[in-house]
Amino acid sequence: MKHIRNFCIIAHIDHGKSTLADRLLEYTKTVSEREAQDQVLDDMDLERERGITIKSHAIQMDYTLDGEEYVLNLIDTPGHVDFSYEVSRSIAACEGALLIVDASQGVQAQTISNLYMALEHDLVIIPVLNKIDLESARPEEVGDEVVNLLGVDPSEIIRASGKTGEGVEEILRAVVERIPAPKGDPDAPLQALIFDSVFNSFRGIIAYFKVVNGSIHKGERVKFINTGKEYDADEVGTLKLSMMPKDEIKTGDVGYIISGIKTSKEVKVGDTITTLDNPADKAIAGFEEVKPMVFAGVYPITPDEFENLRTSLEKLQLNDASLTFQPESSAALGFGFRCGFLGLLHMEIIQERLDREYDMSVITTVPNVSYLVHTKKGEEIEVHNPSGLPDPTLIDFIKEPFIRASIITTTDYIGPIMTLCLGKRGELIKQDYLFGNRIELTYDLPLGEIVIDFYDRLKSVSRGYASFDYQVHDYRPSRLVKVDILLNGEQVDALSFLTHADNAVPMGRRICEKLKELIPRQQFEIAIQAAIGAKVIARETIKAVRKDVTAKCYGGDVSRKRKLLEKQKEGKKRMKQIGNVEVPQKAFLAVLKLD
């Protein structure tokens, strides 16, 4: 055990985690030259295309220092705020972390939030300044920022470059010397923490675990404590670039188990594995459940694809434990699922993965957050969907979730950022000058205002210099109203939304104008209305496509023309009664991007 080190790499998005991981793998000869490629651990097409890590990746390296051989288990984690749940799971399986800071950009919001997460789990932090080969690198200034943040000695900060490979040897030495070996009792009953799982269409579900106490052998009968299910450990092994089967995984090591599990509900991330012969009396504590932030309806384009969509979501949930879903139905779209996501990027990635990996084209409704509705009877109901709102006469008040947001930027952009936050009903809590011209603004903001376009607008007003991180803070009473969208007097429930009373009229107007552009013209007139209850607050009309019925009349009495026009009017009226309006998929998406 004293030769095992478990560590993860944490950093803000785009600070060079995956590139540095590549260099570590090359240096320890884990990856041969033939297998080497950029971002070797990012195995999804999407990750390579976008240059972001979506999923944590575990891999084992062998390293020799001063004649002694060590086993290093590395987990590369995502940097985007939407995938912070992946980071929390990785941290639970480690004793130390490499905190990577880009020497040209300095400390960012996600750096701080991931750091606090690691410190809560008592991890040893090794600070690394990456990208020091860049001309724009400011190693001295950024080094001071890291010293202020961590309170470490400047000599402890390692200067490295993922591109040139500088400092890689120092990092590996520091991992061995500074990070403690895992603690655990090899003779105790087996307790192994599942920190990830993947679905393999040939082998069933593969669970990744870290052995906390005891050891696990191939062919042993094992039990998952939380679900109470029992299996045979058909294959156990460690994670190199591919899976390496072993006969035994000992205390402190990280490995995988294949036991022919077919249904996704039987594997829960955070569950504990033990053996049947000598079972542990309790599960490993301290694993947090995921809390979805943004909810949206996901519907198949054709209703008979519903069961395929369910299977695809279940398989996807194994690869991404932060996705939650439950069935729901809509009058406009039929049967589908209400899915919970950690943010808008997460929602976009799930949509893309459904399309690529499972060939499922889906319609996604307007995203919204969960509200607490207090009725006049004194009940409290949690509502994830505007159509689930009780009758307005029964509602006493509605509470909406507020977040505590931390925005780090340079002093040049304070004005535009404050204007943006005030426009989103934000409340300034404090502002701290960090170092030099860097400032941290702390705001309380309603989550519903942030969900759609806040992050994009923050990036544009600060020219990309502001970084953003948040935690859900509390629920507060708000003047919220439900706005319905009607087409020819019929409600389209997928376009309904809850918003603050002050924003209802401008928002309703903008949606009506947008729908007028996107819905194709029909043979009859279409009225698009936005309404709060029975009161219509905005209206647009799509004119009918009409034939010129009077073209064949030339000269003669005007009553002949009038007769033909009246006849046409009657026909249009009948058409309107039986005609239905198809809302194109583009319209649902356009409502998200109103600005």
Image (spheres, rainbow, N blue to C red):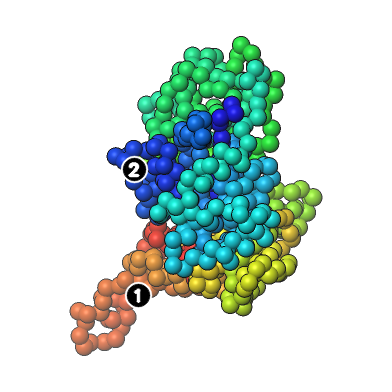
Q: Residue at x 51, y 39 (%)?
A: 74
Badge 1 density bin: few <14, some 14–19, many ≥20, Cα 10 Å = few
Q: Position of residue 93 (x, y in %)?
A: 59, 36
Near-viewer residue (195 or 61): 61
Badge 2 density bin: few <14, some 14–19, many ≥20, Cα 10 Å = some
**Amino acid at dot 1:** Glu
Residue 281's quadrant in the figure?
top right
Mark 2 residue element? loop
Q: Residue at x 39, y 67 (%)?
A: 518
Q: Position of residue 374 (x, y in %)?
A: 74, 53
Residue 354 sits above or below residue 516 on the image: above
Residue 35's quadrant in the figure?
top left
Q: Which mark is residue 36?
A: 2
Earlier in the chain: of badge 1 and badge 2, it is: 2
Residue 282 sits above or below residue 490 on the image: above
Residue 6 visible in the displayed image: yes
Q: Position of residue 82 (x, y in %)?
A: 54, 52
Q: Which mark is residue 566?
A: 1
Per the model, the C-alpha gap separating discs 1 and 2 is: 76 Å
Residue 189 sits above or below residue 546 on the image: above
Residue 91's quadrant in the figure?
top right
Mark 1 residue element? helix
Q: Position of residue 95 (x, y in %)?
A: 62, 38
Near-viewer residue (231 or 566): 231
